[in-house]
Image (cartoon, rainbow, N blue to C red):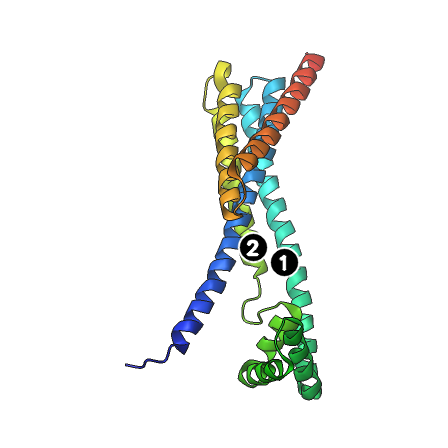
């Protein structure tokens, strides 16, 4: 059995990078669910303020869920595609520079490590060894902040956003169409408050922030949204009546 610790160190570094990536995805998922809760809650509560027709509320809620989920997916796909195209262009340029001016690129990499606090001799040695091992990755990570082997997938981002928004949007939709007329708005409000408290707490924990502040902020925004849209719906219903 080998006593070389290098493979374990490499695996540990890769595990740390993968965990960081999963953490970012989880945080984005929580925020997507939060958007689904707030936007669809505002929509269905507003419609409930104008009418007691369960079908009308359900149709409006489903339409809002579908439109919001597709909008989130499309926006995320376009955004991540643009980012990925930019990263690929930067990597192509880096490959060209490494091929045509390797000495200058190695000196540039050494200067980066000097600015981080290494001595000139050690920075030069580190740059030389990293370049010999994987020149593109070494230079891309240090100069551009890009890992060439782990570019974000636009489709993955789109599906994740759609799923997160849909999961969040189902909470207010079901909470307002299932209860009887007399309790539906209060049931929806209670479900939304509980959902927003949960997403606020989770997002705070993921970001190592103060959970109570995030929960209060989340619940406050959601409650204000429902109050305003319910008032608008009520006024619209009275005017139409």
Q: Residue at x 27, y 81 (%)?
A: 1
Residue 60 visible (yes or no): no
Disc ID at residue 159? none
Left or right for 216, reference 88:
left
Say which quadrant the C terminus sits in.
top right
Q: Quadrant of residue 239?
A: top right
Frontmost residue, 210 versus 114? 114
Of labels 1 and 2, earlier in sequence is: 1
Frontmost residue, 37 versus 215? 215
Q: Which residue is drawn at 53% across and 57% down?
A: 156
Residues at discs 1 and 2 in contact (Cβ within 8 Å): yes
Q: Which residue is drawn at 68% across and 88% down?
A: 103
Q: Where is residue 49 in the image (x, y as percent from the top left)?
A: 61, 18
- In the image as oriented, which residue stretches furthest toward the front? 119
Residue 151 visible (yes or no): yes
Q: In which quarter of the image is residue 225?
A: top right
Q: Quadrant of residue 68?
A: top right
Frontmost residue, 240 versus 29? 29
Q: What element carries label 1?
A: helix
Q: Mark 2 points at which residue?
A: 157
Q: Distance between the residues labelled 1 and 2?
A: 7 Å
Vertical position of residue 105 compared to residue 220: above or below: below
Q: Mark 1 points at which residue?
A: 80
């Amino acid at each position: 059995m080998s006593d070389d610790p290098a493979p374990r160190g490499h695996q540990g570094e890769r595990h740390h990078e993968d965990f960081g990536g999963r953490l970012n995805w989880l945080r984005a998922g929580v925020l997507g669910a939060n958007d689904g809760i707030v936007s669809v809650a505002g929509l269905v509560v507003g419609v409930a303020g104008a009418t007691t027709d369960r079908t009308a509320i359900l149709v409006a809620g489903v339409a809002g869920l579908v439109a919001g989920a597709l909008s989130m997916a499309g926006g995320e796909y376009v955004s991540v595609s643009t980012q990925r195209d930019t990263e690929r262009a930067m990597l192509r340029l880096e490959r060209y520079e490494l091929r045509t001016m390797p000495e200058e690129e190695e000196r540039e990499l050494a200067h980066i490590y000097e600015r981080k606090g290494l001595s000139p001799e050690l920075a030069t040695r580190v740059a030389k060894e990293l370049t010999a091992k994987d020149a593109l990755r070494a230079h891309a990570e240090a100069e551009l902040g890009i890992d060439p082997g782990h570019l974000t997938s636009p489709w993955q981002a789109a599906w994740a956003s759609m799923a997160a928004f849909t999961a969040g949007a189902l909470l207010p939709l079901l909470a307002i169409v299932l209860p009887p007329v007399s309790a539906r708005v209060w049931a929806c409000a209670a479900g939304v408050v509980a959902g927003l408290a949960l997403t606020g707490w989770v997002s705070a924990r993921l970001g190592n922030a103060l959970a109570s502040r995030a929960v209060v902020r989340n619940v406050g925004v959601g409650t204000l949204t429902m109050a305003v849209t319910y008032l608008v719906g009520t006024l619209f219903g009275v005017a139409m009546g």
